Amino acid sequence: MMKKLDLPMLLLAVLVIFMFVLVGLAIAFRNIWFVLLFIFLGFAFMGFGISLKRKRK
């Protein structure tokens, strides 16, 4: 009883995780502008994914 895999949402979730991994990398390189950029992009992609999920229900 496996549900069908929702590939676009999976890729969006992986993209959000990747943005926050890049935040850690930017912290390691001590670049505040990239830290802020990747935090913003991570939350923007997350909000986009949540809005898509709400529209589907």
Image: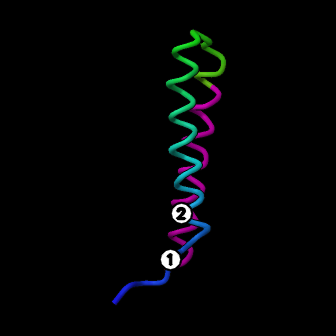
Residue in view at x 61 percent, y 67 percent: 8
CA gap, disc 1 and disc 2:
8 Å
Confirm whether the magenta stretch covers residue 10: no
Residue occupying the far top of the picture: 30
Q: Amino acid at mark 2?
A: Leu
The x and y percentages for residue 21 are 51, 34
Q: Image height check: is 29 above or below 36?
A: above
The x and y percentages for residue 28 are 52, 14
The x and y percentages for residue 16 are 55, 46
Q: In the image shown, does 20 or 55 lie closer to the viewer?
A: 20
In the displayed structure image, the side of residue 17 where residue 37 appears, left or right: right
**Rendering quarter of residue 36:** top right
Residue in view at x 55 percent, y 23 percent: 25
Q: Image height check: is 36 above or below 21?
A: above
Q: Which residue bears the numbered disc 1? A: 5
Q: Image height check: is 35 above or below 22?
A: above
Are the residues at dot 1 and dot 2 in contact (C-beta closer than 8 Å)?
A: yes
Q: Quadrant of the N terminus?
A: bottom left
Q: Amino acid at mark 1?
A: Leu
Residue in view at x 52 percent, y 55 percent: 13
Question: What stretch of residues is rendered in magenta?
Answer: 37-56
Task: Identify the element where label 2 is drawn.
Answer: helix
Q: Which residue bears the numbered disc 2? A: 10
Count neighbours of disc 1 (C-alpha within 10 A) and say few if under 14, some if 14 to 19, many if 20 or more.
few
Confirm whether the magenta stretch covers residue 54: yes
